[in-house]
Image (tube, helix red, strand yellow):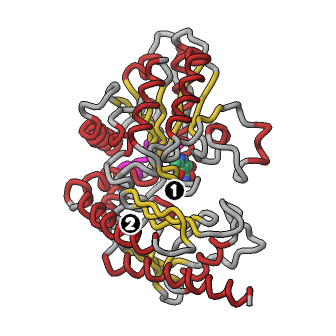
Amino acid sequence: MTQHKICGPALHVDSAAGARLKLRGGQEIIDGISSWWVNTHGHCHPKIVEAVRAQAGKLEQVIFAGFTHDPAEKLTRKLLSTVHGTFEGKDGSALDYVFYSDSGSTAIEVALKMAIGFHENAGEQRHKVIALEGGYHGDTFGAMAAGSRSVFNVLYEPFLFDVKHVPFPKTGEEMRSLAWLDKWLKKFGSQTAAFVFEPLVQGAAGMRVYSPKVLGKMAQMCREHGVLLIADEVMTGFGRTGSMFACEQADFTPDLLCLSKGLTGGFLPMGATLATEEIYKAFYHDEKAKQFFHSTSFTGNPLACVAALASLEIWDEEPVMEQIAAIEASHLKAAGWYSARPDVMDVRVKGSIFAIDVRDDVNGYLSSIGHEIYDFMLANGVLLRPIGNTVYILPPYCIDQQDLECIYETLWRSLDSFRNDCFQQAA
Ligand code: PMP
């Protein structure tokens, strides 16, 4: 995701704590994007550091096929109780089984394979997959196939399996998406294995927000046709949108829930695909050929497990939801100021996420305005990494008010300086 010919040299990070990165030479930078959306409780949270340190001297890694260990068992119990607590009473079956892998992309690959295999093992040939237009699910081939076709994957398009995309339910255009889905399901519902979506916020598409109501409706329509719901909560999971998981706000439990990034608090790589008992049972058989064939060498890695367990315990011990609510309140205030700027369009806030689109001749990923803002922000001690002309703030939940205000203020100055430059050039 870096064009080396036009980007400057990489910055060398020596250490990090809380919401700040420390560069070689001593300069501090506020991590305004949680190091690519992974960090939740701040860098080097002492509880996670201690858990990983203690585990490293005991058991660092072991094959997880035919073997198990305390970190995986304890994490699984804790993760399931968190998920059960979140989705209690929501439409859908309980998520009772977890498959561990090592990234968001692999969590998606696993979910796709489970969905397709589930139907095959039940003797139903469902060879179609649908996904939400604009979605990004990672860069492995299945994940790219599920994602929208874009500059990210255009080179590989001939190699991607066919996925049909439900029009994005932009505010005010929800009926168009529902009508498309209704038509599709009437025609192909019985051939469709799964619906893949990022609930409520599409991250890489530029923090595009849509309503829980339309998501709930789409989920219900898919369910009526036996289409499995694959929720990609790799970015939205663990509090990003203001609730533990985004699907919670749309009042349903997905059949497959993909988690990564914030699962370990952003400390170590780990993916998890949660599934219902019905899906688990489709592979539970006397015949070996019916088992779920997928392995990841580092599945259930003990260090990642203890990091994730410590991270989930922090949710119980520290006022994390209050931190998120405070960030959202600050974002909403900032949204008021930014909405008044003529060079800014479409200001949005969802939980800990704040996003604006900056007016430019080129919209989308190839707009160059993002690079200029990136450089200006870094020169002023803030890491933001715009997606084209979309600039967003997605901080670790531990960020203090002062740092948060510094981000809004620096971004404001960045837009001012950019506008002044444009005026000068025009003159
Ligand atoms: N799904 C979503 C919604 C994501 O935002 C990402 C990564 N940005 C992925 C999947 C892929 O995760 P990873 O980079 O860990 O493979």
Residue 158 locus on image (x, y percent): 80, 37
Gap in angstroms between the C-alphas marked 1 and 2? 17 Å
Mark on residue 207?
Answer: 1
**Which residue is at 44% across, 22% downward?**
223
Q: Is residue 365 left or right of residue 290?
A: right
**Front-most of residues 148 and 276:** 148
Secondary element under disc 2, as helix, strand or loop, is loop
User: Which comes before the other along the chain, label 1 or label 2?
Assistant: 1
**Which residue is at 52% across, 77% downward?**
13
Neighbor class of circle 2 (other Cα within 10 Å; few <14, some 14-19, many 20+) is many
**Front-most of residues 87 and 354:** 354
Q: Is residue 133 left or right of residue 413?
A: right
Q: Is residue 156 left or right of residue 321?
A: right
**Which residue is at 25% across, 38% downward?**
81
> What amino acid is found at the position of numbered circle 1 in the picture?
Met
Residue 200 locus on image (x, y percent): 44, 46
**Which residue is at 59% across, 38% downward?**
167
Q: Is residue 334 left or right of residue 74?
A: right
Q: What segment is highlighted magenta in the picture?
A: 297-305
Q: Is residue 231 visible?
A: yes
The answer to whether the beta carbon of the residue marked 2 is less than 8 Å from any atom of ligand 1 is no
Residue 97 in the magenta stretch? The answer is no
Determine which residue is flagged by label 2.
396
Residue 60 locus on image (x, y percent): 42, 52
